[in-house]
Image (cartoon, rainbow, N blue to C red):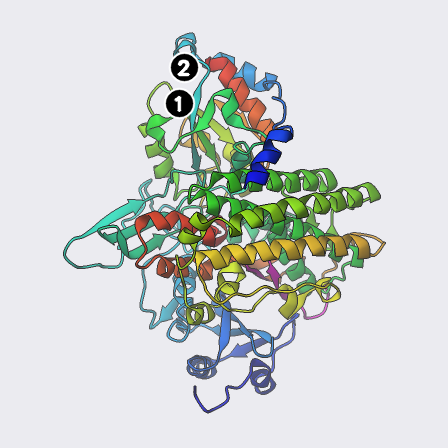
Amino acid sequence: MTAARHPTLSEYLKHNPGTEGHGPWPRVRLVTDTWMALINRLATAPWDLLAEWADGDTVLAAVHDGTDGAVAVLSLTSQGGRFPSLSGSWPSAIRLERTITDLSGLTAEALGDTRRWLDHGTWPVAQPLGAATARPCGLLPLPYTFLPVEGEGLHQIPVGPVHAGIIEPGHFRFTCFGEAVVRLEDRLGYTHKGIEALMTGADVDRAARLAGRVSGDSTVAYALAFARAVEAASGTVVPARAHWLRALMAELERIANHLGDIGAVCNDVAFAVMYAHCGVLRERVLQAAGACFGHRLMMDRVVPGGVTCDLDAAGGRRLFALVKELRPRFEELVDLYDGTPSLQSRMLNTGTIRPELVRQWAAGGFVGRAAGRDFDARRSPGYEPYPQLEFTVPVREEGDVNARVMIRILEVRESLNLIEQLIRGMPAGPVRGPVTVADDQRHEGMSVVEGFRGDVLVWLRLRPDGTIGRCHLRDPSWFQWPLLMVAIDGCVVADFPLCNKSFNCSYSGHDV
Amino acid sequence: MLKLLLKSLLTRPPTVRAPAADPGALEALGRRLEARSRARLGRSLAIREVDAGSCNGCELEVHALNNAVYDLERFGIRFVASPRHADVLLVTGPVTTNMREALKRTYDATPDPKWVVAVGDCAADGGVFRGSYAVTDGVANTVPVDLYLRGCPPTPEQLLSGLLALLDSVA
């Protein structure tokens, strides 16, 4: 323990006030000296890096202080396309800054890893969010240099991008000594669709449809994060009922995904009965969502200004009945999970990550909460209607596969309770209002929303005509993938599917 | 565990009845498939799923085909782990430039006769991602497509009736 007390982010913001035009949290414009001072401060201050991206020639970083709940965006105008890297204090910035170079063309100084990340060399343009210059490209991706591994008796197993199961594409390079994994390195970017470039210049409605397709399993969370960012940037007030309907859909999405994950993790240790039963329960949730909101995954239901659907009395009864049906059936499965030693023997002490690492990377969702990081965006920084609802945020310390499953189990219970509260307490009134682009200075907005996988962050800048000037979407997986590579250390290759499923990181959300 | 098993014995299965084969898809396929290859496969199809850059929404619904409610395997259709074992490639996503080569190689690794089913709106023409520098606006720009199953994402019922149409055509 160091003796000196670290300044909180709130204290820092007192001395470094934000500029106008950014909501709901301040944006502080730094110069090279104060940016460097920030980097030095970060070496000791326990602030989380939430995101780092570029807008034109400016680099921006979103930070969060877990001790006082403060959030801020810090920005620096690059000099000649260069800016000092944050990666010395925050290793989680490495991939973010490699991506900034790929997409925007800015270079992070003193960044140790300068390999391309999302850019595999197959795009017809270089730096699509920056100069966007045409370049020759082939069908074949450029070769990629994996981190070196040396030693006698080592062998490598390349896996992907096309995998054996019905899952998303990505490449994993295992280096093994016998069956033990010595190093695992992931290579992602295969599902990069250029969504942020498509958003630039798009109107808010089209951009909302794109946001809802960043990661299909989190379509409600992404649509919600995008809508909240637009509303923050434009000063739009959303009707109360819309907030409650949004939360209702978000909790249904959480339950459906957690049920799928719990079953799939068990299936990866050949315990198919859990998979089968969880699959049926998940299907019940999706059917109810389809019946009540007109789309099984609830795509395009959350839009800037509110929601596009309402819930009538029959819909409310149907969701009540769903909760009543799920609760006892789910508890039976939890008993089965808890009471099966062969399951426990594979899941306990497998794929363990240390709490320090989770804190350092600000890993969200069940990955963070299974290893002691008590963070849930619904509670802090918080958003409507969650301050009016009762729920607890489960946290465990072990950081293994079992802990990640247990967090999901506990969260399913919480979300079932939340659904009942949401239907009972839902205020009457309109569900959608107009999005009014403010004519004052304010035009940048950010939001942090708790999806099933963790905190989804969206930052955007609106143009005066109401179209998108720049939108950045950061998936929770950015800070979870690298920890999966650590979790597998020393495990046998056969444990990888199990560890991987317990993380269930998004490829599409990460690759955008 | 015993209680669960007992309950499974005493309750009706959750499986839904088979939907009718999609007549539109049947017609489209009838034109493409040769009688010779129809006779060869019997009523059995092995499918290799390839995500060519989808948002993962289609994968969720393709997954649902395997749950006890839709139970795809009762029709003789199953998902296999390797293109070498597959009759059908089921491709999702707009085909990103970064996945194009992998999709092509997977297609080349699939033995003849083979069929390609493009699932979802973005597999058809790029969908909402159409025109992006990073996507190639649909599966047909990389490998020949035999059947389109549209939707964003298509529901399991839609997928099921499309695949049954494929089965009827090749069987």
The residue type indicated by label 1 comes to Asp
Residue A472 is left or right of residue A94, and the answer is: right
Q: Residue at x 83, y 52 (%)?
A: A430
Query: A403 or B145, which is in the foreground?
Result: A403
Where disc 1 sits, the SS reads loop
Dot 2, crowdedness within 10 Å: few (<14), some or many (≥20)?
A: some
Residue hosting label 2:
B41
In the picture shown, does residue A256 fall above or below B153?
below
In the picture shown, does residue A209 fall above or below A437?
above
Magenta-span inclusion, residue A142: no
Residue A220 placement (x, y as % from top left): 63, 50
Q: Chain letter of disc 1?
A: B
Residue stretch in magenta? A438-459
Q: Can residue A118 be seen in this view?
A: yes
Residue A82 placement (x, y as % from top left): 39, 71
Query: A43 or B139, which is in the foreground?
Result: A43
Quadrant of the image occupied by residue A312: top right
Q: Residue at x 25, y 53 (%)?
A: A175
Using the numbered discs, state the Cα–Cα distance from disc 1 to disc 2 in whole angstroms.
9 Å
Q: Residue at x 71, y 63 (%)?
A: A386
Instruction: Say the numbered circle drawn on residue B87.
Output: 1
Residue A290 placement (x, y as % from top left): 69, 38
Residue furthest left as drawn = A152
Residue A349 placement (x, y as % from top left): 40, 59
- Quadrant containing the N terminus of chain A in the rendered view: bottom left
Dot 1, crowdedness within 10 Å: few (<14), some or many (≥20)?
A: many
**Residues at circles 1 and 2 in contact by the CB criterion of under 8 Å:** yes
Residue B156 is left or right of residue B135, and the answer is: right
In the picture shown, does residue A67 fall above or below A294?
below
The residue type indicated by label 2 comes to Leu
